[in-house]
Image: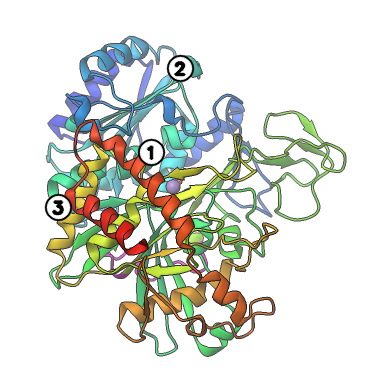
Amino acid sequence: MALTTNKAILEWVDSQVKMLQPDEVVWIDGSEEQLNALRKEAVSTGEMIELNQEKLPGCYLHRTATNDVARVEDRTFICTPTRKEAGPTNNWMDPEEMYAKLNALYDGAMKGRTMYVIPYSMSVVGSPFAKVGIEVTDSIYVVLNMVIMTRVGKNVLDVHGDNPEFIKGTHAKKDVNPEERYIVQFPQDNAICSVNSAYGGNVLLGKKCFALRIASYLGRNEGWMAEHMLILGIENPQGEIRYVTAAFPSACGKTNLAMLIPPEGYRKAGYKAWCVGDDIAWLRVGDDGRLWAVNPENGFFGVAPGTNEQSNPNALASTRKNTIFTNVCHNLDDNTVWWEKLDKNPPTNAIDWTGKPWNGSVDKTNGAHPNSRFTAPAINCPCISSEFNNPQGVPISAIIFGGRRAKTAPLVYQSFDWNHGVFVGSIMASETTAAAAGAVGVVRRDPMAMLPFCGYNMGDYFGHWIEMGKKIPHQPKIFNVNWFRTDDEGNFIWPGFGDNMRVLEWILKRAFDEIDAVETEIGYMPRPEDINIEGLDDVTLDTMKELLSVDKEYWKEDVENIKEFYAKFDEFDTLPQELKDQLAALEKRLG
Ligand code: OXD
Ligand code: MN
C-alpha cells in the first residue's frame, strides 16, 4: 500500500510501475518487522548469507556478479540538454536519446519480480539541509543497504507532506549485463537511472548519484556545495572542537583520516578526534558567516581490505554488528568474514569473493575482492561525533585537499587565500602506484576528488567555488597535504595514519592565526620545527626538512601538466579567469 498521498510521488511511482511491470509493489516503511522479513527472504533465496550471529550480530554477506564489482565511470553519464552543460570531463548523451535507450531496457524489466519503493532522506529527516529521494529497485540488497546508508521510512514521507520536489531514482538489476549497464544522471529532471548493475556505488542511488552528482548541480543553483569530503572534529585538551573537511582521490586513506586516533602523546594530553563523515559533505554558509557542513549519509560504505586493528580500529569496530559485507571472503570455520590485511591468519576453509572454495594457506588469489566493502551504520563507530545528527551540522575552520605525490607536493602547505585555495583544489592529483593496472608514476588530475562526481561542467564548478568564496564572510583556510612523500629508494618517509594528527595540529593553529608560517612559491608552509615530532622514532628534524622541501624543477614540470589538464576546458571556455591567473602567478613565482 502506498505510504503517502503526495500526488507527485504517487504519479511518478505509477509511471515506474507501468514501465517496469513488477508483479508486486512494496513500499518500505522502515519498520524492523518489514526489514526482518526482507532479510529472511534474501537469506532464503541465497541473495544474502546470514553470518555468525553471536560474533557478528545482525551481519550478512552478499556476493555480486564477478563482472559487477565497482563503479563504472565509462558507463556513467550526465545527460543535460547540451554537452557544454555536462562539460569536457563527463560522458554525455542527449537526454531524449538516453531516455529512449533506458525506457527500452526498463520495459517490463521487473516482470515476475517485486518493486520496492524506498523513501529516503539525505541528512536528518526534516532538517533545513535535508533532501528527499525515492528509489525504486528490484533488489532487497539495495533496500537493506539504503536503510543503513540513508534515513529510510514512512516518517520521511510524513515530514515531506505534499511537497512535489524529490529526487527520482530508478534501479533495475536486469541481467547484470555489463554491455548494457548505465548509470545516468539527468540533473534538470532531478532524476537518476541505473540498470544492469547490483554493485553498491552504482545502485545505492542516494550516495554518489544523488548526494554528489545531482546535489552538486542543485548546490550551484541554490548557493551551496556538495563535496566529496570527510568531516572530522579535533577536540583539544580544553574541550574545544575544531572541524575540518578533507577531499582525497581514492586510495589516499580518507576513511582512515575520518576515523583517526591521535598518537599516544596527544591522547594523554587530552586530544580527541570525532568523525562526522567519511565521504560526503554538504556545505552551506551559516547565519554567523561561517561555512557549515553536514554529512548527508547515515552509514559508511567502506573498502574492507586493509582495514584492521592497526590501520583503522574504529572502522573495524563499526563493522561488528548490523553490517552488510559485499564480496569479502567467507570463513566457513566460524561463519565469519575475512579480507586481505585483516590479520595474518587467512582462513583455510573458506569461500572466496567469487564463490569458490579458498584456502588462505595455499591459494595465491585474493580471498576478498580488492574493492570489497562493508556497509555499516555510522552510529556503530566508536568515535562518531555527538554532532552527527545535529541538523545544523558543524562549522568548518579548514578545508584540506590531498593527493599521492612521491616528490612534488610537500607534507603540507596553506593557500595564500580562498581563490588560491580553489586553484590548489583544482590541481589535485595522484600518481599511479604499482597497485593499479597501467604505468607507475603517471599523474592523474582529480580536482577536489570530484572528477567522477561533478554533475555539471567542471569549469563552471570551479567558478561556483570562486563565487562561494565571496559569500563566506568567515572563510575556512584551505590547505594541501601529501602523506605519501618517498625517499630515493621509494620508501614512505611520513608515518601517516594517527600521526597525521601532527599535521592537523599545525593546520588548525594556522586556521586560528595561532602560529606564523614561511611564505614560499607555492603557499605558506610550516618551519620544520613547527610540526610536533615528539614520540616519533623514525622522523627527525632532517626528515621534516625533506618532507617540507619544495623542488622547483618538479613544480615547473607540474605546471606544464596543469596547463595540459586546464586545456580540456578550452572547448567550452569555462575555466574561470581567476584560475588562469593563479596558474600564471605560480609560474611566475617559480621563475
Ligand atoms: C567511494 C569512492 O566508494 O569514492 O567512496 O569511490
Ligand atoms: Mn568516495
Q: What residue does disc 1 label?
A: 452
Report whether 340 appears left or right of 512.
Answer: right
- For the C terminus, the quadrant is bottom left
Q: Residue at x 30, y 60 (%)?
A: 588
Report whether 232 appears left or right of 537.
Answer: left
**Mark 1 near ligand 1 (CB under 8 Å)?**
yes
Q: Amino acid at mark 1?
A: Pro
- For the N terminus, the quadrant is top left
In the figure, 320 relative to 327: above or below? Answer: below
Which region is colored magenta?
Answer: 381-397
Q: What residue does disc 3 label?
A: 223
Q: Residue at x 50, y 32 (%)?
A: 199
Report whether 457 appears left or right of 140.
Answer: left
Count of numbered marks: 3
Residue 14 on image: x %, y %:
23, 21
For the residue pair 139 and 282, the one nearer the viewer reads as: 282
Q: Earlier in the sequence, mark 1 or mark 2?
A: 2
Q: Amino acid at mark 3?
A: Gly
The picture quadrant where one finds residue 367 is top right
Q: Nearer the viewer, mark 3 or mark 1?
A: 1
Q: Tell me the distance, in whole angstroms, between the alpha carbons under discs 1 and 2.
A: 24 Å
The secondary element bearing badge 1 is classed as loop
* Residue 382 highlighted magenta (yes or no): yes
For the residue pair 545 and 253, the one nearer the viewer reads as: 545
| Residue 157 visible at all | no
In the figure, 148 relative to 75: above or below? Answer: below
Q: Amino acid at mark 2?
A: Lys
